Amino acid sequence: MAVTDPKPRVSLEQITALAKRRGFIFASSEIYGGIGGFFDYGPLGAILKRNVKDAWWREMVELRDDVVAFDSSIIMHPSTWVASGHVGQFVDKLVDCTNCKHRFRLDHLASREQCPDCGMRGTLTEPRNFNLMMQTSVGPLEDSAARTYLRPETAQGIFVNFKNIYQSARKRPPFGVAQIGKSFRNEITPGNLTFRVREFEQAELEFFVPDDGNDVAWYERWVEARKRWYSQYGVTPERLRFYELKPAERPHYAKAGIDVEYLFPWGWGELESIAHRGTYDLDAHMALSGKDLTFFDEASKTKYTPLLIESSAGMDRTTLTMLIDAYADEVVRDAESGKETRRTVLRFHPKIAPVQVGVFPLARNKPELVAFARRLESSLRPHLRSQYDEGNVGQLYRRQDEIGTPFCVMVDYQSLGDDTVTVRDRDTMRQDRVNVEGLQSYLAARV
Ligand code: GAP
């Protein structure tokens, strides 16, 4: 697909600086120098990520009657990872530089002649396999019997529980199981802020269908559903693509696969993979465990192994996408003075904006304005994500624009007389005079 907007609106450095300055994303354990591939979400980032996860959960679970919820443990029996193929095959090819000691993924190197970091020729080692699973040990003895792994994907918790789930939920294929949770991968080269990290959250849907010839139609339906989800939250269509994997690019057992990709400042990057995985996963667990994970159809008294359609989205990558996609640096003209100024604004969709409405008094040293604004903000709080703030008016608006607040409410002297306030729209910067009584419904209609 042609890149219609190759110019990034924001650099990685700009977004990293804004993320730190405004409390979206911090390097983990920064006071000790950080630890590569781990990040913390600040006060606004934590809300943004939660909103992204909630938006996924709402659409994929709450609004459907054919998907049930699940939450499995991070540490599972080590045999899980033998059956899934992760012990044997979840590897990246790794190359070391004998001069600068830096490590590279073989598939990230343009050439094997020269180290991309120190520039020396002939210093790169032969590639060797590096398993990406993080090991840990369970119990007081650190012997090999206690060794297991932090899960590299949440999906396996669903597969091994397939029978428990369908029996307890009284579901029959076609139906799905959804889970959001942490996964861990010992990435060789973490980077690009939270894009490639070693601890991250996945939102996975495992949708089981009967082998009745409708499986590909189900796969296509899920691809369409995921397209709708991204567009619903305003991700710029030109920066999003659904890349269909060629047969050689997908695992041998997969009938079809699509990578959802976003055009990041550093190029296209994967947000989600959607795949038709056949019976591969259930078959693998049945073979190793010796347990029956087929579906028994009471009506026809037959049993069969359902086919699987999977949608697996990275919540950290999606949150980063929302942050980057919302970013705009623009020149704006003041309606009254005509003066032009620059502003940075995050045009978050109101549903995922960490703060939906800011409420301020025109002057912080006027107790009646402060009391009015505080009262108003606490009346909005049960209904919207609101924030009270006070200070210089220009700075208040600048700050709220930079954290992506769609609406700002100003309490001024007129408010004291007629119970009206001004509501400023983040995107158009238009100001409406609104009656306090109708304010909540005015805002609710717009978020
Ligand atoms: N169960 C299928 C599965 O795990 P995947 O393509 O390996 O598929 C799914 O991972 C999604 O998880 C990716 O599209 C990405 O969004 C996210 N993800 C994977 N590795 C990641 C990493 N190191 N850092 C952040 N997100 C990652």
Image: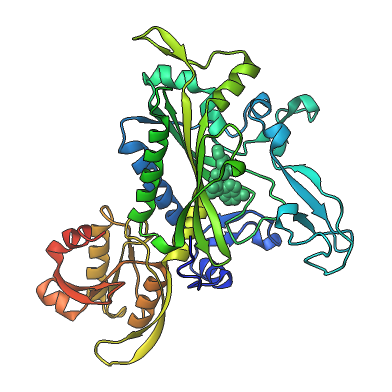
Q: Is residue 46 visible?
A: no
Furthest-left residue in view? 418
Which x, y percent locates residue 366?
A: 26, 79
- Horizontal side of residue 105 vs 381, given as left or right: right
Q: Is residue 33 visible?
A: yes
Residue drawn at x 58%, y 13% is 291
Residue 65 picture location, percent across and down: 31, 31
Please state the total of marks drawn on the protein image.
0
93 with respect to 284 (left or right): right
- The image shows residue 324, relative to residue 82, as above or below, that is below
Quick one: 68 or 410, which is closer to the camera?
A: 68
Image point (43%, 56%), residue name: 48
Q: Quadrant of residue 66?
A: top left
Q: In the figure, is residue 123 to the left or right of 351?
A: right
Report x, y in % for residue 142: 79, 30
Q: Nearer the viewer, residue 315 or 108?
A: 108
Q: Is residue 421 above or below residue 105?
A: below
What residue do we see at 30% from left, 38% from top? Answer: 63
Which of the 4 quarters of the picture holds residue 376? bottom left
Q: Is residue 73 above or below residue 360?
A: above
Quarter assignment of residue 405: bottom left
Residue 33 locus on image (x, y percent) = 71, 62
Q: Residue furthest front?
A: 247
Residue at image coords 63%, 43%: 184
Quadrant where the C terminus sits is: bottom left
